[in-house]
Image: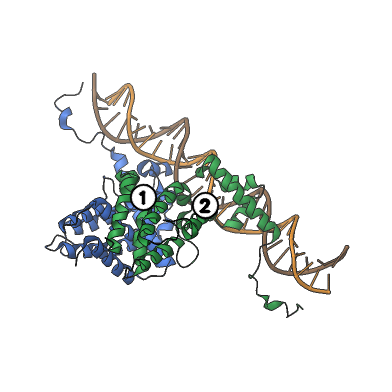
Chain colours: A blue, B green, C brown, D orange
Amino acid sequence: MPDPLLLPMADQPTAERADAARNREALLCAARRLVEEQGVAAVTMEAVAAAAGVGKGTVFRRFDSREGLMAAVLDFSETAWQASVISGPPPLGPGPDPWERLLAFGRSRLESTLVHADLIRAAGASGSRAAGAYSFAAMHVRHLLDSLGVDGDLPILATALLAPLEIPILDQQLHSDGFDVERLLAGWEDLARRITGHA
Amino acid sequence: MPDPLLLPMADQPTAERADAARNREALLCAARRLVEEQGVAAVTMEAVAAAAGVGKGTVFRRFDSREGLMAAVLDFSETAWQASVISGPPPLGPGPDPWERLLAFGRSRLESTLVHADLIRAAGASGSRAAGAYSFAAMHVRHLLDSLGVDGDLPILATALLAPLEIPILDQQLHSDGFDVERLLAGWEDLARRITGHA
DNA sequence: AATGAAAACGGACCGCGGTCCGTTTGGCTC
DNA sequence: GAGCCAAACGGACCGCGGTCCGTTTTCATT
């Protein structure tokens, strides 16, 4: 019988077994290498499995699907970006002027999305949103809007601001419509001005 | 030697051969039936080919890919909707008040997108945009914005208005964030008000 | 009607994402 | 350390999207 004094520790429901954790790490590592050496298209589940020295079934057990694996790879880069938004230097990081911060956010988000475009596309539905109720970006924008004294349905307005920066919309504008990045950025800042009512 | 007097007629480069046209029709027909009887997921290229009584290769020859086929099926419904926007009854169709028309457009577009959601997802990148330089919807919104006297980069502003009505964004808001359709619609109208500067 | 070349056809074939299930392994308890 | 069970493993297997290429059909020309 387990000691009842040890039970209330309430660690996570069931931790990951040692071999499982090791394999997860090896797989993520192999996937990252494949992405940067041969591009996203070359990242086959079988290739990743082989590169990590495990069976194909294991990849699926750890990441559910190719999209899940891509999302995990993406998360790696994404986390660094989030950190610079939360605690980096102004104007992107915390600073006195929310408006400047919003502009910096838009520019940074646009760049970051374009850099990881292939990965985001490959991550499918998991490419844009995080695990929690709101994605990090939505929460942040909502917060900035609040700081700017905007009133209205802030979660919805935040989405309206983020939507034109999502990959499907960017793809259309850049590749079908032929707009260039400068124009998109200027347009986005205009949109932000109209939504916030900022001078 | 071909008669030079007949050459300058300049009909379309090369018309579709009779059997090809017949098969295209049969395939589209079969695909539509499969969609409405068994859902989009059941629409396999092989299934469509079998239902139309042709070989699998023919389906690809006519529609390039599954996405292409889906886009063709979608186009069928889409055309009817476009007609009602162009020449239907107000407020969606032509009328005296562009603002009311814009609101009607948003509502109608949202509904239509949700109704065909599965098909649009299956049509991938071809799901949202048309063949020409601008999709029909973008052109229409751009025109309405112009009628309302909005100034700025109208193509970009039109995209900003359409982006929150695209499937990926709707999916996130409806399924991850848990917003309901009423709220999305109210939010969109607010967005339209802010963008146009309408009272 | 005969003919010849371009276009269309069909189905075998390939690669990849995803599943299944018999086998192995890690980490408990005694 | 022995023994047990849940968890993890691995690779054969399946279905589908997409390609390829030898065969058939259409149609313009004569």
Are the two marked residues, 2 and 1, in contact with CB atoms closer than 8 angstroms? no
Residue farthest to the bottom, as pictured:
B4
Helix, strand or loop under label 1: helix
Q: Residue at x 65, y 68 (%)?
A: B14
> Which quadrant would the N terminus of chain A be assigned to in this image?
top left
Mark 2 Cα within 10 Å, few/some/many (few <14, many 20+)? few
Work out whether disc 2 and disc 1 sit on a shared chain. yes
> Which image quarter is the C terminus of chain A in?
bottom left
The residue beneath circle 2 is B77
Tell me where residue B43 appears, x and y as whole percent.
54, 45
User: On the rendered structure, is B81 left or right of B103?
Assistant: right
Q: Nearer the viewer, residue B111 or A129?
A: B111
Identify residue for label 1: B170
- Judging depth in this view, the residue of A45 and D26 nearest the camera is D26
Q: Is residue A168 above or below residue A68?
A: below
Report if residue B52 is visible in the image.
yes
Q: Chain of mark 2?
A: B
Q: Position of residue B90 (x, y in %)?
A: 43, 56
Residue B53: image location, x then y, percent? 67, 47
**Number of numbered discs present?**
2
Which label's residue is closer to the chain start, 2 or 1? 2
Q: Nearer the viewer, mark 2 or mark 1?
A: 2
